[in-house]
Amino acid sequence: MSISTLNHLAAAAAAGGGGNGKPLSPAAPAAPRSVSGVLGSQWGDEGKGKLVDVLAPRFDIVARCQGGANAGHTIYNSEGKKFALHLVPSGILHEGTLCVVGNGAVIHVPGFFEEIDGLESNGVSCNGRILVSDRAHLLFDLHQVVDGLREAELENSFIGTTKRGIGPCYSSKVTRNGLRVCDLRNMDTFGDKLDVLFKDAASRFQGFEYSKSMLKQEVERYKRFAERLEPFIADTVHVLNESIQQKKKILVEGGQATMLDIDFGTYPFVTSSSPSAGGICTGLGIAPRVIGDLIGVVKAYTSRVGSGPFPTELFGEEGDRLRKAGMEFGTTTGRPRRCGWLDIVALKYCCQINGFSSLNLTKLDVLSDLPEIKVGISYNTTDGQKLQSFPGDLDTLEKVQVNYEVLPGWQSDISSVRSYNELPQAARRYVERIEELVGVPVHYIGVGPGRDALIYK
């Protein structure tokens, strides 16, 4: 195809038509945008589960599209009882909601059953309410062992993973020797496939012990798991697309966050999946045109776990004070989180990638005791040049100088406030300044951990 032809097609497309001047899809009806999403817009732990739990009654289905039990979502029921979820979607507390774990997720079956047993023992019925994709990959205990061996191998440059085996499981998926949920329906070949996986790990890591008796034990174990998991297994691609055709409403719950995205995050200090908007389509098997509103969840400050650059990080007493006030310890690992000021450069970058229609600003109450609050509004290089975008190069990111804007604190308890106009003027100014800087409206404001501690703006 010649350059002139390409130019002609590009011009025609820009004008709303094909190369002959006709519309590109003259008969295609507008797709119903029945899929919404709640995604993290920092380094995770922003409070996504709470918003999903609040919004779930408005939706027929809540779905996870990526990640595994490395996600930790803390939610509270109407009686104030705390639930720590890891793989099961946060819509599970609402009886009329179907929960789906999509093909892009990885499933540690023993952990999945442990989570279900915990819910059931606390009066939450899971029977017939959770579907697991037959295309999702299985995460084995061996992946968790490999995760620890890999981190030990890296020594001082370790990634800081949860050691839940997520990365090694996705590695098995990409190298095409992984096992999927549907393999549990073919136990006659399951052992041979698992043998390949074990041998691969043993050949790669000296500390990995493997024997045929181990394989036999694991196969017998998974025969029992297969029987119990069968009622949960479904072709979720079909289920979700049928639901879309039936005009059912679907809410996607992201795990981790955009700054941990395998492509867009602070690589290599990232997760092994795509927690940004693109992961919704690949992780559930749905078309981009059915996706409507995407809500970005962002803390009123910033936190991250594990290693990697963190431009607005606070150290010493300042960091400790924020960590203590925000109870910043991981739901999944219990690790203390690193804390710092809100990073607008990173937040704008996440908003660009995901196209958020609105934001949920969480933990605003954590800042209540501070006399002044800083916001990182731009980065400079070491020679004083202003960076125009969030850098992909970690050497550059680690050396940036953050330019801060200082805003007054409100120094009053806002945890009982439920109306935006009742917030102190300084708190409202903080929220509105964030909106001005990122160009996305804040529609939800969290002022406490409880389900009702949410202000609608």
Image: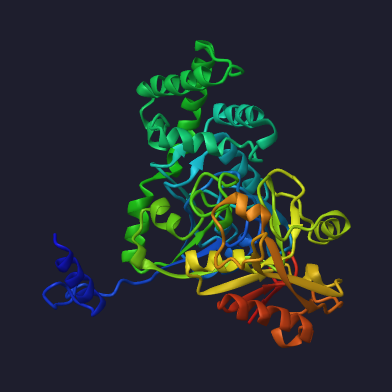
- Residue 149 sits above or below residue 108 on the image: above
| Left/right of residue 252 with respect to residue 404 in the rendered view | left
Judging depth in this view, the residue of 148 and 371 nearest the camera is 371
- Quarter of the image where the C terminus is located: bottom right
| Left/right of residue 435 with respect to residue 202 in the rendered view | right
Q: Residue extending furthest left?
A: 20
Indicate the position of residue 59 as horizontal and vertical percent values. 48, 67
Asked which colour scheme the image uses, the reply is: rainbow
| Left/right of residue 85 with respect to residue 63 in the rendered view | right
Q: How many marks?
A: 0
Question: Which residue does the image show at 77% across and 86% down from the upper left?
Answer: 425
- Residue 143 sits above or below residue 292 on the image: above
Q: Quadrant of residue 239?
A: bottom left
Q: Is residue 198 visible?
A: yes
Question: Which residue does the image show at 14% across and 77% down from the upper left?
Answer: 22
- Quarter of the image where the N terminus is located: bottom left
| Left/right of residue 2 with respect to residue 288 in the rendered view | left
- Residue 391 sits above or below residue 224 on the image: below
Q: Residue extending furthest top?
A: 212
Judging depth in this view, the residue of 307 and 189 nearest the camera is 307
Question: Which residue does the image show at 67% across and 54% down from the upper left?
Answer: 399
Judging depth in this view, the residue of 410 and 348 nearest the camera is 348
Indicate the position of residue 379 as horizontal and vertical percent values. 65, 65
Indicate the position of residue 329 as horizontal and vertical percent values. 76, 51
Q: Is residue 108 visible?
A: no
Indicate the position of residue 300 as horizontal and vertical percent values. 71, 69
